[in-house]
Image (cartoon, coloured by chain):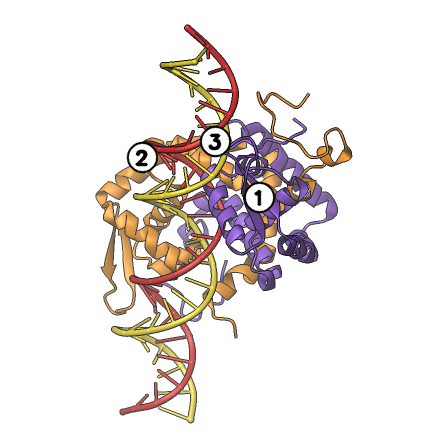
Chain colours: A purple, B orange, C red, D yellow
DNA sequence: TCAAGATCGTCAGACGACTGACGAAATTTG
DNA sequence: CAAATTTCGTCAGTCGTCTGACGATCTTGA
């Protein structure tokens, strides 16, 4: 798996079947592959967007607020599948950086109404090509048909388990 | 008109194309789907293993140490695709709970040699059925062939990006 | 041999993420 | 209307994760 180590670590039962199947029980788990694939996706996005100092979660929130000005934090959370605490934390970061505003709702005192600042809108626009590059790089090893298959399978997984997870995706068109 | 929400949140451009495509730019991103699918996998695992108070990362480390007694923390990190800090933190948790031991290496003073305690081995054994249930539940919406396809596609993603993601983390960029 | 370089574990700092709890504010219900 | 319930935002606590730095230690090369 990672064959360039200069000084190989002591291995279990060298040359035996045990070595070949080391951690097979873990590597075969779909959850492990999903964790790893997600880790890779985060890394690729971070690389492409390094100069903007924006993470993929922050990007998602910026896009949501951009497309739906006046949305509140719970709305963002439901749209992106985050919980309220995480959303509040990340929104706080973006507000502190001056990328979005968090105002009181006119009639509902509980809500914080979100909107992009000029700087946030500019950053989002500048970010689009980098986000596209990240997506393309992530999918580079797959053919368009394979990417479509992967997308469809992940959608099936998401749809089936949506209600079971504490934070179901709530899209306005539902 | 707008789903089952009792008090629907204000939606963008009601009835227009904007509503139907709200966040389509995000939902279409494979990184978003991977994040969501990973989130679901974590949740299912946590549900099945709730009574054991063990996370999927902790499970992976326990299995690695079980299959490879005497492995050190960097070995665990490389095997599971974690960095040294994360590994050290989680190993510390497991040690504090008495599930594994962390001893000095006989000849290499830098290394910490890991091994399961009796309690760790017992827990790991008791955990196996729950982990299997988690995997089955996660894959429930897919046929065996589809699960195999998903596995293969994620493997392609992992293999292609493996060197790009992990090696720079382990070796300072030069 | 001994200085330079590599490796291991750890720490601090940051972010993402979830749970459980709480107060403030709104809505529902008796 | 008043009380009970729900909803929104936040806080504290925990865990996973990465980055960058550091000291201790081991390996290498001049």
Q: Is label 1 on the same chain as label 2?
A: yes
Report the residue at 29% width, 47% height from top.
B94
| Residue D22, percent from left and from top | 33, 73
| Image mark for residue B34 | 1
Position of B136 relative to B163 (above/below): above
- Mark 1 crowdedness (10 Å alpha carbons): few <14, some 14-19, many ≥20: many
Residue A166: numbered disc? 3
User: Element under label 2?
Assistant: helix
* Quarter of the image that includes the N terminus of chain B: top right
Q: Chain of mark 3?
A: A
Q: Which residue is mark 2?
A: B52
Residue D21 found in image quarter? bottom left
- For the residues tagged 1 and 3, is the chain the same? no
The relative height of residue A146 versus residue B160 in the rendered view (above or below) is above
Q: Which badge, 1 or 2, comes first in the chain's sequence? A: 1
> Taking C18 as reference, is B3 above or below it?
above
């Amino acid at each position: 798996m990672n064959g360039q180590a200069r000084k190989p670590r002591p291995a279990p039962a060298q040359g035996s079947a045990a070595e070949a199947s080391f951690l097979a029980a873990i590597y075969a788990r779909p959850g492990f592959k999903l964790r790893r694939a997600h880790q890779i996706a985060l890394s690729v996005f971070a690389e492409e967007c390094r100069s903007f100092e924006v993470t993929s979660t922050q990007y998602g929130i910026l896009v949501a607020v951009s497309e739906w000005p006046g949305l509140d934090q719970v709305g963002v959370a439901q749209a992106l599948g985050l919980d309220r605490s995480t959303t509040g934390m990340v929104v706080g970061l973006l507000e502190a950086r001056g990328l979005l505003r968090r105002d009181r709702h006119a009639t509902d005192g509980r809500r914080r109404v979100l909107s992009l600042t000029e700087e946030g809108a500019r950053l989002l626009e500048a970010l689009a090509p980098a986000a596209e590059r990240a997506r393309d790089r992530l999918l580079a090893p797959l053919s368009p048909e394979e990417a479509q298959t992967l997308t469809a399978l992940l959608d099936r997984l998401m749809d089936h388990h949506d209600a079971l997870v504490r934070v179901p995706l709530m899209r306005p068109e539902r």
